[in-house]
Image: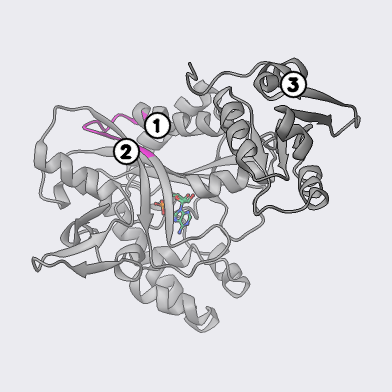
Amino acid sequence: MFEDLGVFLRLGDATDVVTKEMYDFEDKGGRRIALRPEHTAGICRSFAQHRPTTPWKVWYSGSNFRYEKAQAGRFRQFDQVGIEVLGSTDALLDVEVISLGWQFFQSLGLTNVVLMINSLGDPEDRAAYIEALREYFESHSEKLSEESRATLQRNPLRVLDSKRVQDKTIIDAAPTISQFLSEDAQAHFTKVKAGLDALGVTYSVNEGLVRGLDYYQRTVFEYVSTSLDSAQTAVGGGGRYDGLVENLGGPATPGVGFALGIDRTLLACDSEEVFQGASPQIDAFIVDVVDGMTALRLADELRAAGFTVDRAYDGRSMKSQMKVADRSGARIAIIIGPDEAEAGNCTVRNLMTSEQSLVLQTEVVTHLASIVGERNPRRNTQ
Ligand code: AMP
């Protein structure tokens, strides 16, 4: 959860996550610490520290923290599940990584997730492209939104991320990265596309896709949910970061990986209704108008036998407890009044049909099982 602040500072001044969104503080030993805003940098730090054999394939899940403007689908604490592979530049590894994330969304049953890919080229291609973008946007800066003019000073690539209507026509006519790709980077991208085609993974190339973290080079990708109606529709993303380990003080080691946003994935699952609603139904509701002791004992016994049971509290009247029983959605009410308490039995009432019968308290478990079916016992009551 914590990482040495220096690890993230090495990601560079152009990375918003680092410059604007990081929670950092000094601990009691005077160390400068950050709450991790993402996992990849920490994994590369760990690789540089422990030098495992390559290819090194790892996965993670956990919380990240970013001091962002919170809104629908964008939180200050959010969870990610991700994978990273260090030690190979093979384009077909990019394909494996992309397709694994793709399959994850497919297996959840999400049909409205689209895959977008792009190549940011090698560092020199990227640098040349950034310069061309800077020149282009500066020559049109009076037409850009104020926010994009500020972004332009920090990182011209990120201007492409602007969703502001005012910026759209300028961005649409901006130079594209494909004009700047080296032969090697082009060949790599062609192989990635061929690999995805071979696996039947559908994608579209989006030259505006640059991703927020500035360590990416060559392949970048994003999974986007078209059923989320907020501004935040990316449910996951990743790419290749061949220079990152070296940047963090390790041996030159290529890497590729993805991070899937769990919170947004769950929002997408809700909007596509892929999960069956949880059944709110409980098996039995106990109404005890004597002193609550029989309800306490029976609820304990029935729960141990695996039934889902609730009861009323605070010694309320029969009428008020029956109302709660009706509202609870329970199929059966188990009622204990003074007569039942004295005779050691209870009235078992079917709340759907209003049929009722007297049952010995010692036989309630068996009786309930005969109505709603056996359950798996939660503990041994012998
Ligand atoms: P990133 O680490 O920025 O590449 O993000 C990868 C994925 O994490 C995104 O596609 C989102 O699904 C999710 N994510 C990133 N930032 C947030 C956030 N502030 N709140 C919720 N999910 C986020």
Q: How many marks?
A: 3
In this picture, residue 14 sits left or right of residue 172:
left
Q: Nearer the viewer, residue 192 or 313?
A: 313
Residue at horizontal 27%, vertical 33%? 89
Q: Residue 139: percent from the left, percent from the top? A: 45, 78
Q: Which residues are magenta?
A: 82-91
- Residue indicated by mark 2: 256
In this picture, residue 286 sits left or right of residue 160:
right
Q: Residue 382: percent from the left, percent from the top? A: 48, 16
Residue type highlighted by circle 1: Val
- Residue indicated by mark 1: 97
Q: Earlier in the sequence, mark 1 or mark 3?
A: 1
Q: Earlier in the sequence, mark 3 or mark 2?
A: 2
Residue type highlighted by circle 2: Val
Q: Nearer the viewer, residue 332 or 66?
A: 332
Q: Residue 344: percent from the left, percent from the top? A: 70, 27
Residues under numbered marks 1 and 2 in contact, where contact means CB atoms less than 8 Å apart: yes
Label 2 crowd bin: few (<14), some (14–19), many (20+), radius 10 Å: many
Residue 132 sits in quarter: bottom left
Q: Residue 32: percent from the left, percent from the top? A: 15, 66
* Helix, strand or loop status at disc 1: helix
* Helix, strand or loop status at disc 2: strand
Does the magenta segment cover residue 171? no
In this view, the residue farthest toward the front is 342
- Residue indicated by mark 3: 372
* Helix, strand or loop status at disc 3: helix
Residue 326 sits in quarter: top right
Residue type highlighted by circle 3: Val
Residue at horizontal 40%, vertical 58%? 212
* Mark 1–mark 3 distance (CA, rounded to whole Å): 47 Å
Position above or below: 204 against 18 = above
